[in-house]
Image (cartoon, rainbow, N blue to C red):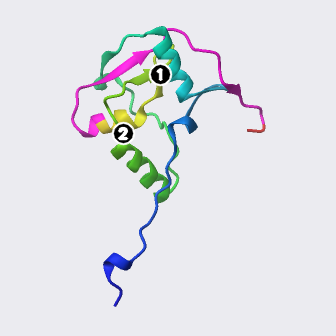
Amino acid sequence: MIKQENLPKLKIKDRALSENTYRIGNKYWRVTTLIQYAKEKEYKIFDLPLIGIDISITPFDVNNFSDFLYHSNLVNKADTNYPIILDDNGYIADGWHRVAKSILNGENTIKAIRLEEMPTADGEYTNEQ
């Protein structure tokens, strides 16, 4: 009989912050660009009521159990001490996993920053992408 401690562990994929992007139309921004821009502009951090967030949208793809585990892991690891970032239209550009964690933890608000204007995009998608 195989001892439980000798069984291999299932690995869940992970992603570095620098790999996260936000897309509007064919333009995209690295999340690190948005964070740096918000710091440079010294935008104020405020408490955003979670009750006002539209949770009917699908902010990320979950096509299988592996995807579900991946995003569940990111929710578990999310640090709600960092504010989410709203784009210039008020949509969440960065922070959906923190929003999920805050809702699951029964919080009423989440720290947020609202960009008044978008920085220069990091790139554009072509029709082939």
Residue 12: % across, % down: 46, 57
Structural crowding at the residue carrying mark 2, measured as other residues with C-alpha within 10 Å and reported as few (<14), some (14–19) or many (≥20): some
Q: Secondary structure at mark 2?
A: loop
Quadrant position of residue 110:
top left
Q: Which mark is residue 78?
A: 2
For the point 64% across and 16% down, the residue is: 120
Specify start and end residues of the magenta stretch as a single range.
102-127
Quadrant position of residue 43:
top left
**Number of marks present in the image shown:** 2
Is the residue 72 above or below the residue 17 in the image? below
Is the residue 17 above or below the residue 65 in the image? above
Marks 1,2: beta carbons within 8 A = no
Q: Which mark is residue 128?
A: none
Give the residue at the far bottom of this rendering. 1
Q: Amino acid at mark 1?
A: Tyr
Is residue 119 located in the magenta-colored stretch of the structure? yes
For the point 73% across and 38% down, the residue is: 129
Query: Which residue is under mark 1?
Result: 91
Q: Earlier in the sequence, mark 1 or mark 2?
A: 2
Q: Nearer the viewer, mark 1 or mark 2?
A: 2
